[in-house]
Amino acid sequence: MKKKLIKDFLPMGRRCKKLLLIMRLSLLLMFAAVLNLTASVYSQSVRIDLELEDATLESVFQSIQDQTEFDFFYKNDYLPRDKTYTKTYNNAKIDKVLNDVLLGTGLIYRVLNKDIVITKGQVSDSGGGDDLFSQQQTKTITGTVSDENGEPLPGVSVIISGTVRGIVTNKDGTFQLDVPTDAKALMFSFIGMKTIEVELGNQSSFTVTMKQDVIGLDEVIAVGYGTMKKSDITGSVQRVDVAQYETQQATSMVEMLNGTVAGFNSNQGTSASGGGSMEVRGPTSLAASNRPLIVLDGVIYNGSIGDINPGDIESVDILKDASSAAIFGARSASGILIVTTKRGRTSKPTINFTAKAGIAGITNHMYPQTPEQYTTSRGDYWADVNQDKPANYYTDPNKLPPGLTVEEWKNYDTTPSDDPVQMWFDRMGMTQIELDNYKAGKTVDWYDEVFKNGLRQDYDLSLSGGTQSLRYYWSIGLTD
């Protein structure tokens, strides 16, 4: 008797499990139907108040979006720019407003749950038109969208190819969409990702991986407030790759940039520390400074340019014309030098030591006058000052012209001296020491005494490296 009861009870238990499963499915279907009914009732029942005055189509959409739970999706290129609206709507349905403002624009709208998609077409989802998909047989497509690392992507637009009907993925990156049986493909688009098209075929479930849409690094230029494509910058931007100047003996950035870029002029400083003046495309002000603005690693640098070690510079971008003004304003009127220093890289600790030595001298010699040239120029000077004096009054008595004797030359003065050389030096205002040295044939080459060849020494030591979470670069330099 006990065995028989157990046998009768087992089938009854299986039937109960089936009944519970059917009840759960029914509840899920009922819940989905209630959601769809709620969205449909909301789109038909919601009413809005608008007071438009010279309003653009974009501002109309924004006003509707502010008063309702609808979100608008459209391409900016589709919207007419020269069309404005001046009208008042009181307690009006959304379809009434949209039909009015879209009339004559060639645009239609589609209502997808609580999303309104604006596109080009013939028939909108208004009271007078039927949904283009309402009379077609459909099938349900499900799927998951993730990035290259397997992370789910919420908010990805999933659109039936060739239409404006679609949906967006939820927070788990999954979606479920009813598509016509003759649909060919689905389009997946997301900001920062490459848009891809997936053929449907006979599949009903998909796993989609989206790749990042990365701009080539060689087409990106650092600017004041971020990065932009090189083709988007108007004006002249030139980059100086410092690597090709590492073998040069440059003690400052001014020396390193000298003669490298067209339109950039620099004058070498006279001090031992280097430095100098810089101009981009000539002077821009009569009274203010013509020095270009220096931006060092993204920060405006107001210090001495001689304090920037050329060995620490990775690259220099020279901004000219309107590009610099558009980024940094009036301070960039004389151009911009964007200096990027070297950074640590993910590697083992690396030590670099550089030593340079050389001879510094004058390239264009401008030798002074010889003693004979000096005395001649001195006499010419005084002859020009005292033009009332006789000709050859300041001439060397040993080089008098023919027909003029030394006695006649001495008698130009009322009290002539027995020493004509002393008379000559007295007339030119020379000192007794100069007279003594002249008679003794003693001369000093002051040019050679002052300008000597100098020994230049430049030493740089740097330590760099890093891990995935920490990178470092340390350097010290000495210039003598």
Image (spheres, rainbow, N blue to C red):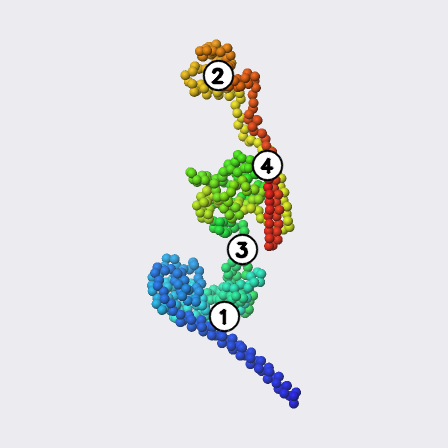
- Name the residue carrying label 1: 178
Residue 204 to residue 373: above or below: below
Disc 3 marks a residue whose amino acid type is Val
User: Taking the image as drawn, is residue 140 in sight?
Assistant: yes
Label 3 element class? loop
Discs 2/1, front: 2
Expressed as whole percent of the image width and height from the top left, the position of residue 458 reads 60, 38
Disc 2 marks a residue whose amino acid type is Asp
Q: Distance between the residues labelled 2 and 1?
A: 116 Å
Nearest the camera: 12 or 361?
361
- Name the residue carrying label 4: 480
Nearest the camera: 191 or 121?
191
Question: Who's the residue at 54% across and 51% down the image?
Answer: 217
Q: Relative to 166, is 88 on the left or the right?
A: left
Q: How far apart are marks 1 and 4 (CA)?
A: 78 Å
Disc 1 marks a residue whose amino acid type is Asp
- Name the residue carrying label 3: 214
Q: Residues within 10 Å of mark 3 (few under 14, many from 20)?
A: few
Q: How far apart are marks 3 and 4 (CA)?
A: 46 Å
Q: Do the residues labelled 1 and 3 touch (CB within 8 Å)?
A: no
Expressed as whole percent of the image width and height from the top left, the position of residue 172 reads 54, 66
Q: Residues within 10 Å of mark 1 (few under 14, many from 20)?
A: some
Mark sitting on residue 426: 2
